[in-house]
Amino acid sequence: MEYDHGHRVTQHIHGMTPLERAITEFEERAKSAHNLKIAPKTETAEQRLNREKSLSKALNHLKAERALALAQVQVQTQLDEYQAAFCLFYFVASMLRYPDHLYECH
């Protein structure tokens, strides 16, 4: 959690959209994978091999997570376009039906 002058900067998980949550999780996994690249000074050959294997697994997983995040971006974009089109349709249909009422798209 990050705070700026007593106000929360980062959101809770339940307050994020699915896209924001996917991006946040991807960033956290990328940071942990980056930390695997850093070798301790007293690392043995076996420890290095294990670290490189786990780094390889983490990078492959991040590639899959990136593809998932990109798919969520596309879905969110299409959903926003659909909602905007539906709102416009509803607004026009309402204006034709009841021309003397005021309507707003949300």
Image: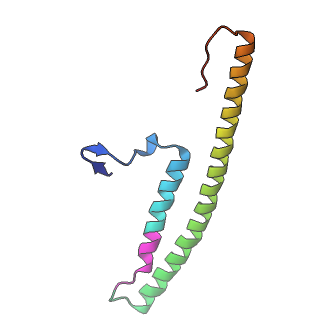
Q: Indicate whether 102 appears above or below 16.
A: above
Q: Residue furthest front?
A: 100
Q: Where does residue 9 sit, x and y in percent of width and height? A: 35, 47
Relative image position of residue 64 (x, y in whole percent): 62, 64
Up the image or down, 13 lies above or below 71; here it is: above
The coloring applied to the image is: rainbow
Q: Is residue 37 magenta?
A: yes
- Residue 93: image quadrant is top right
Residue at the image position 58 percent from the left and 61 percent from the top: 65
Quick one: quadrant of the C terminus? top right
Q: Vertical placement of 54 versus 40: above or below?
A: above
* Range shown magenta: 32-40
Q: Nearer the viewer, residue 103 or 78?
A: 103
On screen, residue 102 above or below 8: above
The residue shown at (44%, 79%) is 37
Question: Magenta region, mostly helix, strand or loop?
Answer: helix
Q: Is residue 63 magenta?
A: no
**Residue drawn 70% across and 15% down?**
95
Direction from residue 44 to residue 5 in the image, left or right = left
Q: Position of residue 31 (x, y in %)?
A: 44, 67
Question: Which residue is nearer to you in this view: 70 or 64?
Answer: 70
Q: How many marks?
A: 0
Q: Residue at x 69, y 43 (%)?
A: 78
Q: Is residue 78 left or right of residue 8?
A: right
Residue 82, located in which quarter of the rendered image? top right
Q: Residue furthest bottom?
A: 45
